[in-house]
Image (spheres, helix red, strand yellow):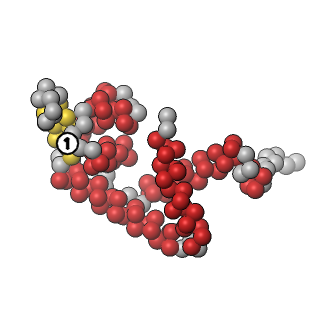
Amino acid sequence: MSYAIDMPTSEKVARTNAGVASELRIGVMRLRRRLALERHPDNELSLGAMAVLGALAVRDGQTVGELARGERVQPPSMTRTVNCLEDDGYVERGTSDADGRLVVVRITERGRDTVLADRRRRDAWLTQRLAELDPDDRDVLRRAAPILDRLAGTD
C-alpha cells in the first residue's frame, strides 16, 4: 500500500498565485539556509546578532527600540543582543546627535569588518552559483531581485 501524496506538477501549481507563493517560499527558504551555511568560519555570532550588525551597517545610530522594530523582536530581546554585541566590541552605545537624551547604538570598526567579511564570503558563493546558470536564468534573477526585496519589505 502506498501512502505517497499526489502532488500536482510544478507547471500546474505555478499557474496560480498560491502555487507561485509555495514555490517561492520553498526556494527562498532553501537559499536562505544555504547562505547561512556559507557564513565566515571565524564568525560565531548568531544570525540575529548579524542582522543587527547589518542593520547598523546600513543605518548607524539606531535606538534599541528602532532595532527591535526593524528585526521584529521585543525590546528586551534586542537589549540582550545589543548587550552581547557591546560586550564583545561589535557595537557601542552613545547619545544621539539630534537629541542628546536618546541612547543610540553604533557599529564599531570590528562590527563593520565582521559584517563585510561575512557578506563577501556569502556573495562569493552566490556569485559562483550564478555563474553556473545560463544567461537567461541570470537575467530572470536580475529582474526578480528588486521584486523579492519589495515583497520582503511589505507588511
Q: Which of 59/26 is in front?
A: 59
Q: Quadrant of residue 75?
A: top left
> Circle 1: is it few (<14), some (14-19), or many (20+) Cα within 10 Å?
many
Image location (x, y in percent) of residue 29: 54, 49
Where's residue 69, x and y in %? 36, 32
**In the picture shown, does residue 105 fall above or below 40?**
above
Closest to the observer, 4 or 147: 147
Tell me what residue is drawn at x 25 percent, y 37 percent.
62
All told, the count of numbered labels is 1
In x, y percent, where is residue 105?
21, 38
Location of residue 147 with respect to 104 vertically, above or below: below
The residue lying toward the viewer, choosing from 155 and 71, is 155
The answer to whether one can see residue 86 in this image is no
Identity of the residue furthest to the right in this view: 1
In x, y percent, where is residue 20? 66, 48
- Look at mark 1 in the image and give the residue it sits on: 106
Q: Left or right of 112: which side holds 32?
A: right
**Quarter location, residue 60:** top left
The quarter of the picture where residue 106 lies is top left
Please state which amino acid type lies under the numbered disc 1: Arg
- Can residue 72 be seen in the rendering of this structure? yes
Does residue 114 appear left or right of residue 23 in this picture? left
Q: Is residue 58 above or below residue 116?
A: above
Element type at marker 1? strand
Q: Residue at x 59, y 67 (%)?
A: 137
